[in-house]
Amino acid sequence: MLDDFFVRAMIAGIGIACFAGPVGCFIVWRRLAYFGETIAHSSLLGVAMAVILDFNLVIGIFASASIIVTLLFFLDRRGGLPTDTILGLLAHGGLATGLVVLTFVPGMRLNIQSLLFGDILAVSQFDLVQVWLGGIVALVILLWLWRPLLVSTLSTDLATVESLRPNRAKFLFGILVAAIIAVAIKIVGILLIVALLVIPAATARRFANTPEIMAAGATVVGVGSVVAGLFASLQFDTPSGPSIVVCAILIFAISRVVALCVKLIRSHLG
């Protein structure tokens, strides 16, 4: 029999994978991996805010991440600095500021390592509610934004002509990524959360011929990575968050080898 903490970890991890898969597809399509890293890294500032003001960590992380998204959107539209420069400033500025602020908090009981790399085995029942409730809301919003995001990914001009308001969709998608990161940080941590968004989507991309199939495939790969990673963590006594990411990378590598073999066989037979 599996312990309760392991079952909770499994349920939480599967929930994150289900919600991160479709969102990760747009991150891959729109080449926003560094954007996700920026939100994740700067979210440590939200942790500091939550500790100082004594409120829920998820709310603090989401609030700070939303502020970063808004600031990024505003600076990007004004121009003046390249987007990657703005992302670098916000990512490392937020991470460094959060770490510095946390050192001034007297009697702080937070484990910085668990924030950076996750502590899925410490997931509580309340955390499960936050993960699944937040994830379901995020999926509903993503379904509403699906067509505007998809069309604007292909062509911003086309989305504008069709009155799909691509700038609004882009901003709301940023807020959506902030929400996913806020509820998922406890699972894989600040430094690894984007891996759970990007790697399953990159794996599914090779075998999908429609956006919907790719989103479903990314979800399946994400769930498989979580299950394999947690059992590997239990078996070999390794950190759970990094174990999940390593399993995702292995699945990605295997998928590339399989795709290459299939391509060689087809070219040989053809």
Image: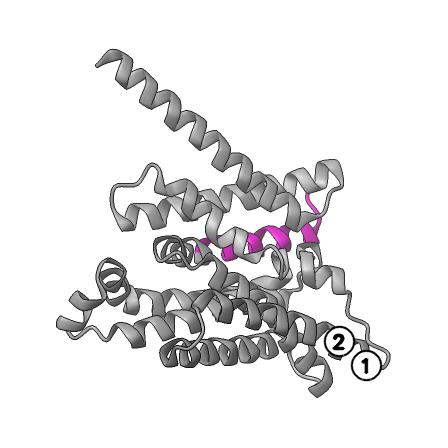
- In percent of width and height, residue 117 lies at 68, 56
On whether residue 17 falls in the magenta region, the answer is: yes
Does residue 84 appear to the left or right of 191 in the view shown?
A: left
Label 2 sits on residue: 100
**Dominant secondary-structure state across the stretch colored magenta:** helix
Q: Is residue 87 above or below residue 193?
A: below
Who's the residue at 64% across and 79% down the image?
A: 56
Coloring basis for residues:
one colour
Location of mark 1 (residue): 104
Could you tell me which quadrant the N terminus lies in?
top right
- At which x and y percent is residue 202? 42, 45
Seen from the viewer's position, the closer of residues 177 and 270 is 270
Q: What percent of the width, then of the height, locates residue 46?
A: 62, 77
* Residue extent of the magenta highlight: 1-18
Q: Amino acid at mark 2?
A: Val
Residue occupying the point 67% across, 81% down: 50
Name above or below for residue 258 compared with residue 138: above
**Amino acid type shown at disc 1:** Phe
Residue at the top extreme, as displayed: 269
Question: Does the magenta-highlighted stretch encompass residue 211?
Answer: no
The Cα atoms of the two marked residues, 2 and 1, are separated by: 7 Å
Q: Are marks 2 and 1 in contact (CB under 8 Å)?
A: yes
In the image, 57: left or right of 82?
Answer: right
Left or right: 204 in relation to 162: right
Residue at figure coordinates x 37%, y 74% from the top left:
172
Q: Position of residue 186 (x, y in %)?
A: 64, 62
Q: Dot 2: within a 10 Å radius of its alpha carbon, few (fewer than 14), some, or many (20 or more) residues?
A: few
Tell me which corner region of the image, top left, top right, bottom left or bottom right, holds residue 137.
bottom left
Identify which residue, 70 or 241, lies in the foreground.
Answer: 70
